[in-house]
């Protein structure tokens, strides 16, 4: 089987984000970057399918030079090779444009299954995987928690949580799935894996290689950001000092008159 995990590099989920001075984005200087956590479930699922059925696991990501670090991490986890979509034409690409680039490239490739995280934790779009499947005309199953693949019949059976039960979806391959958090436990790169990753190939993919132009990418973008702002402070803490009886009386007043919960 030839398996592809599409991954995205996002700001470290433990980082404290700061806005740029013009409030048009986040400050990226000294910001740490990681593989979007849901995408790690996709990588792990691909690795387990390879272990069960043999084959090859490829990872791919679109973004600037720093994305190579995340691709190396995926290779250290056990992926066989990586593709880095890097080109000035890709700058400013949103989810719709990213899906266009991937699907144009995939039209000339042979994969049995594409695995993605259910969503990227930076923008929560949940769009790239669905748009890629739509453009390719492949079946698409979202938020999969369990997966069985039969290479002999070129079919898969996916289990996904729904309200009150589990939905079972069977469809032919090739297909696109997204992986839910309870699908598996992503492995940590071993020291041996980290060493091997240094010699595994990361192939750059330009706009020309993908079969798109800068105008194609710009034309596919349909998301525009306005000003960025921190969430409004909805709750303020108050410290009430004084004798216990007075404190209780004031607390009851605040709960009744300001919080309006009594």
Image (cartoon, grey):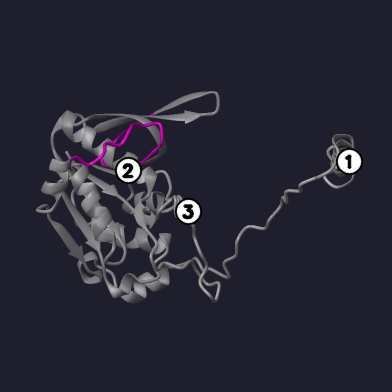
Whether residue 175 is visible to the viewer of this picture, yes or no, is no
Q: Is residue 28 left or right of residue 80?
A: right
Quarter of the image containing the C terminus?
top right
Residue at 36%, 32% (x, y): give it. Answer: 183
Q: CA distance from mark 2 to mark 1?
A: 48 Å
Q: What secondary structure is found at the residue carrying circle 3?
A: loop
**Region rendered in magenta:** 169-190
Q: Which residue is mark 2?
A: 40
Left or right of residue 132: residue 203: left
Whether 49 is drawn above or below 61: the answer is above
Quadrant where the N terminus is found in the figure: top left
Residue 257 location (% of width, % of height)? 89, 45
Taking the image as shown, residue 90 lies to the left or right of residue 230, namely left
- Farthest front residue? 243
* Label 2 packing within 10 angstroms: few (<14), some (14-19), many (20+): many
Q: Residues under labels 3 and 2: Cα distance?
A: 17 Å
Return the disc, 3 or 1, that comes first in the chain's sequence.
3
> Residue 193 appears at what percent x and percent y?
15, 43
Disc 1: which residue: 256
Question: Which quadrant of the figure has residue 246?
Answer: top right
Nearest to the observer: residue 171 or residue 56: 56
**x and y, in percent, of residue 180 in the image:** 41, 36
Q: For residue 23, which quarter of the picture?
A: bottom right
Residue 176 magenta-highlighted: yes
Nearest to viewer (mark 3 / mark 2): 2
Quote the CA–CA distance across marks 3 and 1. Answer: 40 Å
Helix, strand or loop status at disc 1: helix
Badge 3: few (under 14), some or many (20 or more) residues near its Cα, within 10 Å? Answer: few
Q: Is residue 149 above or below residue 201?
A: above
């Amino acid at each position: 089987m030839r398996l592809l995990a599409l991954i995205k590099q996002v700001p470290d989920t433990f980082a404290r984000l700061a806005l740029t001075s013009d409030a048009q984005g986040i400050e990226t200087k000294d910001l740490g970057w990681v593989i979007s956590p849901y995408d790690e479930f996709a990588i792990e699922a691909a690795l387990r399918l390879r272990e069960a059925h043999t084959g090859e696991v490829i990872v791919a990501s679109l973004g600037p030079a720093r994305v190579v670090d995340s691709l190396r991490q995926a290779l250290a986890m056990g992926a066989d090779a990586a593709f880095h979509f890097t080109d000035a034409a890709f700058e400013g690409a949103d989810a719709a444009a990213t899906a266009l680039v991937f699907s144009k490239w995939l039209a000339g490739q042979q994969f049995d299954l594409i695995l993605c995280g259910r969503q990227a934790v930076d923008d929560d779009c949940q769009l790239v995987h669905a748009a890629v499947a739509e453009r390719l005309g492949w079946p698409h199953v979202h938020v999969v928690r369990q997966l069985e693949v039969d290479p002999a019949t070129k079919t898969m059976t996916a289990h996904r949580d729904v309200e009150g039960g589990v939905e079972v979806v069977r469809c032919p391959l090739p297909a696109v799935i997204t992986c839910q958090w309870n699908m598996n436990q992503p492995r940590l790169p071993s020291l041996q894996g980290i060493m091997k990753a240094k010699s595994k190939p990361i192939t750059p993919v330009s706009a020309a290689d993908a079969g798109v132009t800068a105008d194609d990418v710009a034309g596919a973008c349909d998301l525009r950001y306005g000003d960025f702002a921190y969430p409004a402070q909805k709750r303020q803490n108050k410290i009430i000092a004084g004798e216990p009886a007075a404190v209780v009386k004031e607390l009851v007043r605040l709960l009744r008159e300001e919080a309006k919960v009594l």
